[in-house]
Image (spheres, rainbow, N blue to C red):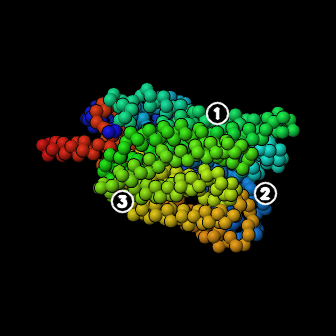
């Protein structure tokens, strides 16, 4: 089985019970805080800001593609739009979204700790993230960068009218934010678990973030090296990637994708953890095959480092290499499928309720499954050669990362919002937002599978007129999707002042975080909990609730 606690009664403790929100006053107290919960909220606000910046660039791309002629903006401006969209969304939203916000907030509480292992480094990681974001905005003010978010050489090293070095600096700095966050999580999980919190009593959210942290720590330095080499080649001409000087442009591809494919799992693994928590809570059952789901996260992290060259099938790798990497790409689908099937078995015969987090979780399962299955197509060498430079890739990537990761992020925000703020949001409008987001996403990206299969190349501002109908449908869907993303911004903000008081455990969940007050105390726990029950043990919760009722009746 898997995590819960024999939690001493913290409500009768004599120490002052001040929550993390109002323990100090003034902006400076937030900017200098070492409290992991406040740092998580700083990340949440800043990540949300960059999400809408990246969304603006996406909107401009879709507006350009309304007509076949490429008549809204110049071709190089269009290149800058989709490049800035990719850079902002990947490095400033998708990579840090769940770990830096929900992971930062809840991992210490879930394991019974009072903070992360290195609180000051945790704050430093946020400042590094913001510094990277400022450099990206500086690039935008200076005129942007037009290499695509992959910085492919020799385009990124020799083309003059672009600000590659500034952007490379942004990614290099933001990379250290990821490394510090991952290191903090790893040490915290190893060293700061409460008594009785064994590895196989950890919530699956902790397992998934732990696996993603290993990827952050091992993979991000490789990207940093590649980006530094691009900047040096661009500024001083060292020639590492220049064939004229004995270099090899394919070397950059190997370095970049060695990080950037594991980065897909850095983004999606924490989302898997969110879905496990949500599905267990709203089906009132233990996660089916807890151990298999936990180890599947580790397996994904391991396999993630052995599939990078499937991005390079058309770039000159040998047929033997392509065959090996095609096989490995197929294998990495197995642990992902384990999660989907185990969630389905968790739902079977469960007491399912359809609160907003559960709707987002269902949306995640549907969209990620489509994205994962189309990834198998792209892992097949023959199919990939024909599809890799088309809109099929764009649709696949967005189904996995935006449809999957963003739905998981929104599921997690809605699931833990009552705990983070002590307030409930309006359930009716939030369910509408979940449905609108799902429908808008399908309308936006499913047509791109079709135009990609038919041969429409990606990264072009103009396209043949026969593709216009599907592109108009995609742009209309993006408008619906934008509404779905905007709605939570308004009603969550509204709930901070007007929302119903949530109580400690509005979902009647079993996690350790639900056994303390909402919002949590500054120190999380006044008394260290002793964990002697398994995770997702709803029988334990029912017995605990019955005991509390009896005590109240006696009182």
Disc 2 on helix, strand or loop? Answer: helix
Q: Secondary structure at mark 1?
A: helix
Residue drawn 64% across the image and 39% down it: 258
First in residue order: circle 1 vs circle 3: 1
Q: Quadrant of the N terminus?
A: top left
149 or 456: which is nearer to us?
456
In the foreground, 174 or 381 = 381
400 above or below 173?
below
Which residue is the site of mark 3?
354
Q: Tell me if I can see residue 503 in this picture.
A: no
Give the class, few, some or many, for how many residues have Cα within 10 Å of label 2's Cα (few <14, many ≥20): some
Determine which quarter of the picture holds residue 229. Answer: top right
Residue 220: percent from left, percent from top = 62, 36
The residue shown at (19%, 45%) is: 546
Q: Which mark is residue 167?
A: none
User: What is the distance, in whole Å, between disc 2 and disc 3 at their CAs?
Assistant: 46 Å
Task: Kindly indicate whether the residue at mark 2 contacts the one at mark 1 (C-beta within 8 angstroms).
Answer: no
Q: Earlier in the sequence, mark 2 or mark 3?
A: 2
- CB of mark 1 within 8 Å of CB of mark 3? no
Marked residue nearer the N-terminal end (1 or 2)? 2
- Counting from the top left corner in percent of width and height, residue 244 is at 87, 38
* Residue 76 numbered mark, or none: 2
Any part of residue 369 in sight: yes
Frontmost of labels 1 and 2 is 1
Q: CA distance from mark 1 to mark 2?
A: 31 Å
Q: Around disc 3, counting alpha carbons within 10 Å, would you say few (fewer than 14), some (14 to 19), or many (20 or more)?
A: few
Residue at 43 percent of width and 54 percent of height: 361
The C terminus lies in quadrant: top left
Q: Which residue is mark 1?
A: 221
């Amino acid at each position: 089985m898997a995590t819960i606690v024999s939690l001493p009664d913290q409500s009768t403790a004599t120490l002052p019970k001040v929550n993390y929100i109002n323990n100090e006053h003034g902006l400076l107290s937030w900017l200098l805080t070492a409290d992991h919960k406040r740092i998580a909220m700083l990340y949440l606000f800043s990540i949300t800001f960059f999400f809408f910046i990246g969304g603006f660039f996406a909107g401009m791309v879709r507006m350009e593609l309304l007509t076949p002629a490429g008549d809204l903006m110049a071709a190089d401006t269009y290149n800058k739009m989709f490049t800035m969209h990719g850079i902002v969304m990947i490095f400033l939203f998708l990579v840090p979204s769940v770990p830096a916000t929900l992971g930062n907030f809840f991992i210490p509480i879930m394991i019974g700790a009072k903070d992360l292992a290195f609180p000051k480094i945790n704050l430093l990681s946020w400042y590094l993230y913001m510094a990277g974001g400022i450099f990206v905005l500086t690039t935008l003010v200076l005129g942007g960068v037009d290499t695509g978010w992959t910085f492919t050489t020799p385009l990124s090293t020799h083309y003059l009218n672009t600000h590659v070095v500034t952007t490379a600096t942004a990614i290099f700095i933001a990379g250290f934010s990821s490394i510090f966050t991952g290191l903090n999580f790893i040490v915290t999980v190893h060293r700061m678990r409460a008594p009785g919190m064994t590895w196989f009593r950890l919530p699956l959210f902790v397992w998934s973030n732990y696996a993603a942290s290993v990827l952050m720590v091992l993979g991000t330095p490789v990207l940093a090296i590649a980006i530094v080499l691009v900047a040096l080649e661009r500024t001083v001409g060292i020639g590492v990637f220049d064939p004229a000087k004995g270099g090899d442009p394919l070397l950059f591809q190997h370095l970049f994708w060695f990080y950037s494919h594991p980065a897909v799992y850095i983004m999606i693994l924490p989302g898997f953890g969110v879905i496990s928590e949500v599905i267990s809570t709203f089906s009132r059952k233990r996660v089916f095959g807890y151990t298999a789901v936990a180890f599947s996260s580790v397996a994904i992290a391991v396999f993630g480092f052995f599939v990078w060259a499937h991005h390079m099938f058309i770039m000159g790798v040998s047929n033997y290499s392509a065959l090996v990497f095609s096989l490995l790409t197929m294998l990495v689908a197995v642990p992902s499928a384990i999660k989907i099937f185990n969630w389905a078995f968790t739902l079977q015969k469960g007491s399912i309720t359809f609160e907003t987090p559960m709707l987002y979780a269902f949306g995640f399962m549907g969209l990620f499954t489509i994205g994962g299955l189309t990834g198998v197509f792209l892992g097949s060498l023959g199919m990939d050669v024909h599809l890799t430079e088309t809109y099929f890739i764009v649709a696949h990537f967005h189904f996995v990362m935006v449809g999957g990761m963003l739905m998981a992020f929104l599921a997690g925000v809605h699931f833990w919002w009552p705990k983070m703020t002590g307030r409930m949001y309006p359930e009716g409008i939030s369910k509408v937002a979940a449905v609108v987001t799902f429908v808008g996403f399908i309308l936006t990206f499913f047509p791109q599978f079709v135009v990609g299969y038919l041969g429409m190349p990606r990264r072009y501002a103009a396209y043949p007129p026969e593709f216009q109908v599907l592109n108009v449908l995609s742009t209309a869907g993006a408008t619906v999707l934008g509404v779905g993303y905007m709605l939570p911004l308004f009603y969550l903000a509204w709930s901070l002042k007007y929302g119903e008081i949530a109580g400690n455990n509005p979902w009647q969940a079993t996690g350790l975080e639900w056994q303390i007050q909402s919002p949590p105390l500054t120190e999380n726990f006044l008394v260290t909990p002793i964990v002697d029950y398994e995770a997702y043990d709803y029988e334990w919760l029912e017995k605990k609730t019955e005991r509390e009722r009896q005590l109240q009746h006696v009182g």
